[in-house]
Amino acid sequence: MVHLTADEKAAVTALWGKVNVDEVGGEALGRLLVVYPWTQRFFDSFGDLSSPDAVMGNAKVKAHGKKVLNSFSDGLKNLDNLKGTFAKLSELHCDKLHVDPENFKLLGNVLVCVLAHHFGKQFTPQGQGAFQKVVAGVANALAHKYH
Amino acid sequence: MLSAQERARVAQVWDLIAGHEASFGAELLLRLFTVYPSTKSYFKHLGFCPDETQLLTHGQRMLEAVGVAVQHMDNLRAALSPLADLHAQVLRVDPSNFPLLIQCFQVVLASHLQGEFTVEMQAAWDKFLTGVAVVLTEKYR
């Protein structure tokens, strides 16, 4: 469970309302694959990931990023029950996808950087604090069903 | 090891920070303390709510050290040796805290540089700062 103060919840809701979820997803996933290239290990079928431009322009990366972020968006509507919200996805990532949960933390951090990149000065320390709590909560929820 | 292109990107970003070490450093520390309150345990001398002057002073010191690292990317170990000694013998900051500082550094860069903060720059800076952290904790044991 993520414990956000009323102010933090308001900050998260306000900022998220201005986010183009479809675009930000692709950007966050793309940046993850470029900044931490070992994460490409999960995306052999995605085609050309040979350069930053190739990654950021890759249609499959964009599509998958959109999917991931829409899921994340669902989490934001259920901050009181992240474990329940992400239970099935957690099982999937463990049993079928075999993704080290460390990757969820990496993606969460990259997502925060993308938000800072988009919002500039509006992305205050308090806003960052609230979002880091949320991404940590989502990462924990996604790791919860691992065995 | 940083490639020539990565070093160029690190230097490019540094040009945008140089001259603003105090304000960047202060914001870096403010974000670190706000987002990861446990990191304040290493800054008892600044108190629970460091004021702007303290943040600016300490922030400047930290960013100036980053500047030294930028000037000596080809020989970080030698250039940062005194700081590595300090961290090993006196400060003893748990290594798990460096990624937290690096995350906040990336956020400061991203929010200030916005459009100029390309993915290539983010990658180069992450690699560079991680290298600095490795050197600073290398003498721990």
Image: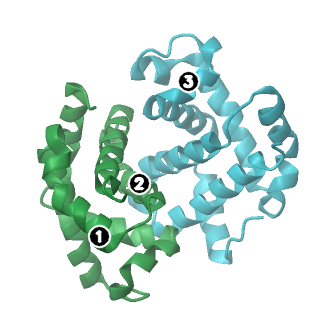
Chain colours: A cyan, B green
Can residue B2 be seen here? yes
- The quadrant in which residue B86 appears is bottom left
Identify the amino acid type marked 1. Answer: Gln
Can residue B23 be seen here? no
- The quadrant in which residue B53 appears is bottom left
Crowd around label 3: few <14 · some 14–19 · many ≥20 (10 Å): some
What secondary structure is found at the residue carrying circle 3?
Answer: helix
Identify the amino acid type marked 3. Answer: Gln
Residue B128 versus residue A68: which sits nearer the camera? B128
Q: Is residue B123 left or right of residue B9?
A: right
Residue tagged 2: B107
Place of residue B46 in the rendered image (x, y in percent of width and height, measured from the top left)? 34, 85
Q: Residue at x 40, y 18 (%)?
A: A51
Distance of label 2 from label 3 (alpha carbons): 23 Å
Distance of label 1 from label 2 (alpha carbons): 30 Å
Give the chain letter at badge 1. B
Give the chain letter at badge 2. B
Crowd around label 1: few <14 · some 14–19 · many ≥20 (10 Å): few
Residue tagged 3: A40
Residue tagged 1: B89
Distance of label 3 from label 1 (alpha carbons): 38 Å
Place of residue B122 in the rendered image (x, y in percent of width and height, measured from the top left)? 36, 40
What secondary structure is found at the residue carrying circle 1?
Answer: helix
Which quadrant, please, contains the N terminus of chain A?
bottom right
Image height of A46 relative to B70, above or below: above
Which quadrant, please, contains the C terminus of chain A?
top right
2 and 3 marks on the same chain = no
What secondary structure is found at the residue carrying circle 2?
Answer: helix
Image height of A53 relative to B101, above or below: above
Image height of A102 relative to A80, above or below: above
